[in-house]
Amino acid sequence: MNLFDEKRIRGLYWDGESLHFIEQTKLPHSEEVIVTRDWRVIVDAIKRLAIRGAPAIGVAAAFACVLAWREDENQKAWNDKLELIESARPTAVNLSYAVRRIRETMQAGDEEDCDANITSEAEKIAIEDDAMCESIAKHGIQLFKPGTRVLTHCNTGALVTYGIGTALGIIQHAWQTKNIEQVYACEARPLGQGSRLTMWELGKLGIPATLLTDSASGRLMQDGKIDCVILGADRIAANGDTANKVGTFILATLASRFEIPFYVAAPSTTFDLNISSGQNIEIEYRDADEVRNCYTHQASPKDVNVYNPAFDITPAELITAIIREDGVFYPPYDFTERST
Ligand code: MRU
């Protein structure tokens, strides 16, 4: 399987025995794939952001659970490994969702069929993710009309799902149906998911795109160059509050200031309806060196204090609509109802 096939980039691929994944930390300089049967390699990849983005983290975690079982088929050891897998990153709820599904499948199945049962459940999680991306894109394009200039943040495409992506999947469909004039992508410092990954994906798709520093977004909107903002999510609370890549809250606040529609696209696996608001979402704080260094170059005096949240929370009141695989939701958000 060529994960870099021009016709369909795949961030992840499961061949029944091994997980293949694009080493995202190396992009765009080098296009490398890691093929592994070791669950520890997957956990490490999630922590390092070699595998990243909420849906991809969930799918990869499901296969990590399968590989962890195959290591020694020992229930007690497996439960301990699942805890390590589940705690690889805290904010994207897709991770605990996937591990819970695999754990429940194991508990519900016959002892002789453990491997087959959990493997088929992990494959189901991946296939469902692919299908949800397609449905999100179909619902999302109704929000676009010819000539749309759209701003996005972080990276939400094929690299971070088992399918075409969430927000970037919508952008891809809107481009194919001639409803996009230009995509603007924020850099997403400190790790450049926008500059390194979204610009790389848009380039492969042949979609016209312009990169900006995160702090240029206000000027861009003030300049009248943006018709809507669309991005993904790591966790959405029952009231619609949304955790996503740090900087999302700034964009939502600016979009509200300029009366620009602000859209979030995510599969149901990213919704955490057990929590009433974003206040209950754990935000991951990452290593200070990510900010002290600009990629590989030192960008500040060595030991400066750093504030480095990976995500922020955008209050639901700033979100114009949320696109899920079953439709488009508008405020006041009630995700237990079917969407309009
Ligand atoms: O820290 P990252 O790169 O994993 O953050 C990812 C994001 O914030 C994405 O926008 C989100 O997971 C949606 S992916 C479809």
Image (cartoon, rainbow, N blue to C red):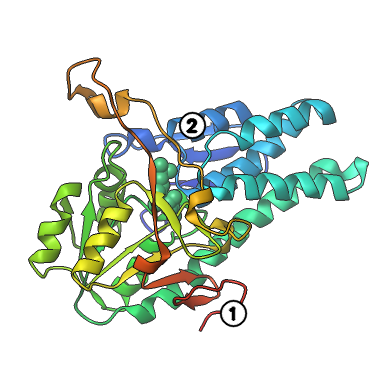
- Measuring from the top left, give residue 284's x and y in whole percent: 45, 37
Q: Give the residue pinned by disc 2.
A: 47
Q: Residue at x 50, y 44 (%)?
A: 91
Three-letter code, disc 2: Lys
Q: Secondary structure at mark 1?
A: loop
252 w.r.t. 279: above or below:
below
Three-letter code, disc 1: Arg
Q: Residue at x 40, y 64 (%)?
A: 264
Of circles 2 and 1, which is in front?
Answer: 1
Q: Secondary structure at mark 2?
A: helix
Q: Is residue 206 visible?
A: no
- Measuring from the top left, give residue 52's x and y in whole percent: 45, 42
Q: Quadrant of residue 326?
A: bottom right
- Measuring from the top left, give residue 128's x and y in whole percent: 61, 61
300 w.r.t. 312: above or below:
above
116 w.r.t. 266: above or below:
above
Q: Give the residue pinned by disc 1.
A: 338
Q: Residue at x 23, y 72 (%)?
A: 260
Horizontal side, residue 221 vs residue 277: left or right:
left
- Measuring from the top left, give residue 14's x and y in whole percent: 60, 45
- Badge 2 or badge 1: first in the primary sequence: 2
Q: Is mark 1 within 8 Å of ligand 1?
A: no
Q: Residue at x 40, y 31 (%)?
A: 286
